[in-house]
Image (tube, rainbow, N blue to C red):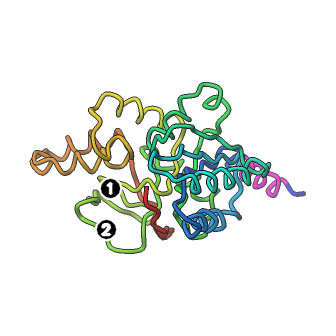
Amino acid sequence: MSDVSQKKNYYLYDFITMCDLIVCAAMPRNEKETEKLGITLNSIQEIKFNTKYILFDGAPERATETQINNYSSLKQVFVKNSEFKVVEFKTNLYYKSMLEKFMRCCDIFNELSDNLFIIQDDVQLDKIDLVRVLKDKEDKEDCKILYFGENRPKAPHWFEVISDDELFVQTHGWSERVWIIKKRDLIGIFNYLSTLIRGGCNGKFIEYYYQNKKKRKYWQYLPEFKKLDYWSIWGCYEYKNVFHKHLVMKR
């Protein structure tokens, strides 16, 4: 093997071993919703990750006995599949709290790779070159959250474009359906959110904190540097030309 080939292989190995997969799953209400998790996993099955985790949220109080039993059977499929490390939660936490509780476990945090590829269980992602994406993200020094949007016009109440270039769109607002972030940056965001008042969807999801900030009347009157100060907490960019399709499971 030539020196050039060796260096290329080391380069690829370094970036692959720097990234873990985290699938965030909730209890499906029926068989059709169960199938959506399969579609999600099929869309990313060719991507190489260091370690694959799947988080199963606890069943909601309104769940029927049949739904709970089916959910238990689904989880057992993954328990028996050595490809995934399974983390089950007994309480119905919702997305934000489930992911935060997982991240704040010291033993888990220490064993996680630096980069986390986080995807919800009802998302179909375009094919991507993860190594290239990680390298591009690394080169964008102020990027914390790199998310993959939908192939449609951005909803103005959700996204406000700050700037764009060949690879990235810098935005106020972001989508948490599928994204990449370094573990230290995710903990930093959770630490910031812990200083805020929870309420409504703020307690269930992460992206809503940014959206609710933008919805406040004073946002439109803030000078640009103040808005950018807030943006720097999140450091969110959309990666161009890689899109996801939302399969729409009810939470």
Mark 2 sits on what residue?
154
Horizontal relation, residue 117 to residue 155: left or right = right
Q: Hey, what amino acid is under mark 2?
A: Lys
Q: Is residue 181 above or below residue 149?
A: above
Tell me what residue is drawn at x 32 percent, y 47 percent. 201
Front-lying residue, 176 or 29 = 29
Main SS, magenta region, reads helix
Q: Is residue 130 above or below residue 112?
A: below
Front-lying residue, 24 or 226 = 24
Does the residue at mark 1 contact the one at mark 2 (Cβ under 8 Å)?
yes
Looking at the rendering, the stretch of residues picked out in magenta corresponds to 3-13
| Distance of label 1 from label 2 (alpha carbons) | 10 Å
Residue at the outermost right position: 1
x, y percentage for residue 91?
51, 37
Q: Quadrant of the C terminus?
A: bottom left
Q: Is residue 96 above or below residue 47?
A: above
